[in-house]
Amino acid sequence: MHNAAAALRFAAALAVLLVTDGSVAKPARTRPSPPASSCADGERVVYSCRFGMKIGSICLGRNSLHYRFGRPGRPDITVSSSPDWSNIHTGGNRSQGGLNQDYIRFTNGKTHYVVHVDETGSLNENPGIASSGIEVLEGETGSATLASLRCKSAARFNAKAFFDLNRSAPAAWNGAEVPGGPFEMIY
């Protein structure tokens, strides 16, 4: 009788192995993976979104900020903060319930890369709709649009990294857009 019980246990164990392809381990709980980015090791992702086969990212280093756009691991465009961060500007728009928007603008010569995140407000016909994208503008005042890219995912600014910009920037940096200036607009 003892042998019959052992044989039954063995048969049950063999059946479990056959049904599970030899694995009796519980599946690991998976966490959502962070979005792909072009940020280097040691940099924090402020923003990242896939645009077709390319990725647009803003990456915060210890004392620097970087805009990168291109294929993963091989960006076509890189704009880094100058030592005084004079080529980095931040801004936002708050309407009375229609739209809330924050953006970071990188300037390289007369080309401006504006990464923006938006959310429709409570008075909009579709409140709470989040969107983001990249605008590439040319000229002293950004009067010519070279590209306008819309992110298809729900990419947002990493709030903690976004607010830490001031800690990484030089003490004298004031990157706020000029009120009423040419770049203070809704993108």
Image (cartoon, grey):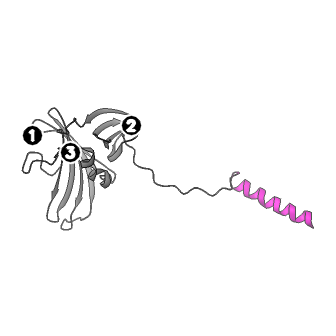
Residue 16 pos. (x, y %): 73, 58
Q: Do the residues labelled 2 and 3 touch (CB within 8 Å)?
A: no
Of tags 2 and 3, the one toward the viewer is 3
Q: What element carries label 3?
A: loop
Q: Is residue 18 magenta?
A: yes
- Range of magenta residues: 1-24
First in sequence: mark 2 vs mark 3: 2
Per the model, the C-alpha gap separating discs 2 and 3 is 33 Å
Q: Where is residue 183 in the image (x, y as percent from the top left)?
A: 12, 46
Where is mark 2, residue-wise?
72
Q: Residue 171 got which mark?
A: 3
Q: What amino acid does circle 3 point to?
A: Ala
Amino acid type for the residue under numbered disc 2: Pro
Local SS, label 2:
loop
Identify the residue position indicated by label 1 in the image: 141
Q: How crowded is mark 3: few (under 14 residues within 10 Å), some or many (20 or more)?
A: few
Between disc 3 and disc 1, the foreground one is 3
Relative image position of residue 181 (x, y in whole percent):
7, 47
